[in-house]
């Protein structure tokens, strides 16, 4: 059976970010079509206590809301947290690497809490720091966490963001530079909002690994929960079967943001930097200035994910040449997702995706299709037939454009988010722009 999971979130204890209410999440899960959701921060003692009051185990390792109303009774939760392993790396300095952990039950969570306390890890923040000398110590500690239960999952998170294992912050070339001997035991990595299976296929060392996608959300909002997810093929709905499917690579598909929308996709310099004024520039890897310097201010450009991944591909290839974009097909199916509420807002010309107007149209769409996932699975003709006259034409046109793949993103660069562009597809290779608004 297909089972849709979103196994990475933050409760509100992760250093002041997030504010998750599980009933609100359950409501959104039902509308999005998510079966199981990671609760976030499960090693934070106060939240852990809260969780055991809020939740009751329904299937092995899967939890439901206690006394849930019928419409929320189907939502399942997985005990999950994110931790940060810090260690010295070969490029110098200390790197912090985000890692998702999931547990089969409260017993295993409590053993993990005891273990981390023994290591003097401060657990009062939701996303604790596990300080290590070097990759060898990270390996030792990962082995200790893994030995709490054979179904505990240890998944490097959002691997290409600055805080991910391959991120630009204290860069490393290989998993073993952070995870040491435990790198061999890693079964899966998380794509994150900034990468997808197509891009990660350029990295030889990920060839045998499962790619999972999660929302990493900090709220129960419609455009957050399930904004990325993984559809697994499982024998039955249970935590051990979820962990087994991920270990075996039994993934039907992942739902992915377009990496171009991420804040660091292309190399560039944003407006507002010293000597920039309103001017900015961005470059695809083949168009980056040879000296790596900004043509506007003359300083070093901020390297984007696309350029970083090509560098990693060269470093991980024995011949030093690496894989060219498009030369390595993705090993896992992925679908591009744009949150429906964002599509509706773009169609209506509404800037704020949390506006009442967009939410009202979203509800009208789901009155016909039940969940967002089921909507996107319909052919465009069915969508048009169901929604014509039911929602404003501009919103319907936007939904059909996205369903047909007729959309792209202004690329993100140097901390500037990309944005949805409807009715146009753009290939980001061979692309460069130097914009000087004052100097026309
Ligand atoms: Zn993280
Ligand atoms: Zn510059």
Image (cartoon, rainbow, N blue to C red):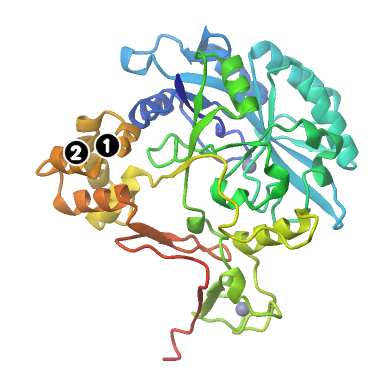
Which numbered dot is residue 382?
2
Q: Quadrant of the C terminus?
A: bottom left
The x, y position of residue 347, in whole percent, is 25, 54
- Residue for point 77% across, 58% down: 315
Q: Residues within 10 Å of mark 1 (few under 14, many from 20)?
A: few
In this image, 278 relative to 114: left or right? left
Q: Which residue is mark 1?
A: 378
In this image, 101 relative to 430: left or right? right
Q: Quadrant of the N terminus?
A: top left
Can you tell which quarter of the image residue 294 is in? bottom right
Residue 181 seen: yes
In this image, 205 relative to 144: left or right? left
Q: Nearer the viewer, residue 198 or 398?
A: 198
Tell me if label 2 and label 1 are in contact, CB under 8 Å: yes
The x, y position of residue 278, in whole percent, is 49, 79
The x, y position of residue 296, in whole percent, is 59, 84
Instruction: Describe the element under mark 2 as helix, strand or loop.
Output: helix
Can you tell which quarter of the image residue 209 is in? top right
- The Cα atoms of the two marked residues, 2 and 1, are separated by 6 Å
Residue 196 seen: no
Q: Residue furthest left?
A: 389
Q: Nearer the viewer, residue 12 or 156?
A: 156
Which numbered dot is residue 406?
none
Q: Residues within 10 Å of mark 2 (few under 14, many from 20)?
A: few
- Residue for point 39% across, 16% down: 74
The x, y position of residue 128, in whole percent, is 72, 34
Which quarter of the frame holds ligand 1? top right
Q: Is residue 171 above or below residue 427?
A: above
* Ligand 1 within 8 Å, label 2 CB: no
Q: Is residue 364 above or below residue 65?
A: below
Q: Nearer the viewer, residue 121 or 185?
A: 185
- Residue for point 68% across, 50% down: 203
């Amino acid at each position: 059976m297909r089972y849709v999971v979103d196994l990475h979130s933050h409760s509100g204890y992760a250093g002041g970010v997030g504010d998750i209410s599980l009933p609100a999440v359950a409501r959104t899960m039902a509308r999005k079509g998510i079966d199981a959701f990671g609760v976030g921060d499960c090693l934070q003692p106060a939240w852990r206590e809260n969780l055991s009051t809020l939740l009751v185990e329904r299937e092995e390792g899967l939890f439901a809301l206690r006394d849930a109303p019928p419409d929320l009774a189907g939502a399942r939760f997985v005990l999950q947290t994110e931790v940060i392993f810090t260690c010295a790396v070969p490029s110098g300095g200390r790197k912090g690497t985000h890692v998702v952990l999931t547990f089969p039950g409260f017993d295993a969570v409590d053993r993990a809490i005891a273990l981390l306390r023994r290591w003097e890890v401060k657990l009062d923040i939701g996303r604790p720091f596990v300080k290590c000398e070097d990759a060898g110590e990270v390996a030792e500690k990962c082995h200790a966490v893994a030995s709490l239960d054979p179904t505990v999952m240890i998944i490097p998170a959002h691997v290409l963001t600055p805080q991910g294992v391959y991120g630009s912050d204290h860069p490393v070339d290989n998993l073993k530079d952070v995870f040491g001997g435990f790198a061999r035991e890693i079964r899966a990595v998380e794509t994150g909002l900034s990468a997808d299976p197509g891009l990660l296929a350029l990295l030889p060392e990920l060839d045998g690994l499962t790619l999972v996608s999660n929302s990493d959300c900090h709220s129960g909002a419609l455009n957050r929960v399930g904004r990325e997810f993984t559809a697994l093929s499982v024998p039955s709905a249970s935590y051990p079967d979820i962990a087994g499917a991920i270990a075996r690579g039994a993934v039907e598909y992942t739902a992915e943001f377009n990496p171009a929308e991420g804040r660091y996709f292309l190399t560039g310099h944003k407006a507002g930097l010293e000597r920039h004024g309103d001017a900015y520039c961005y470059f695809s890897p083949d168009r980056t200035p040879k000296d790596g310097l900004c043509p506007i201010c003359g300083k070093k450009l901020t390297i984007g994910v696309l350029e970083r991944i090509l560098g990693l591909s060269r470093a991980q290839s024995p011949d030093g040449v690496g894989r060219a974009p498009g030369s390595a097909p993705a090993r896992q199916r992925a679908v591009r997702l744009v949150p429906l509420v964002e599509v509706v807002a773009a169609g209506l010309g509404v800037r704020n995706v949390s506006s009442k107007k967009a939410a009202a149209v979203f509800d009208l769409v789901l009155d016909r299709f039940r969940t967002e996932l089921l909507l996107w699975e319909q052919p465009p003709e069915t969508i048009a037939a169901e929604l014509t006259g039911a929602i404003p034409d501009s919103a319907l046109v936007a939904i059909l454009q996205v369903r047909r793949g007729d959309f792209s993103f202004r690329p993100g660069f140097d901390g500037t988010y990309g944005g949805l562009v409807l009715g146009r597809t753009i290939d980001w290779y061979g692309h460069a722009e130097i914009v000087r608004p004052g100097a026309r």
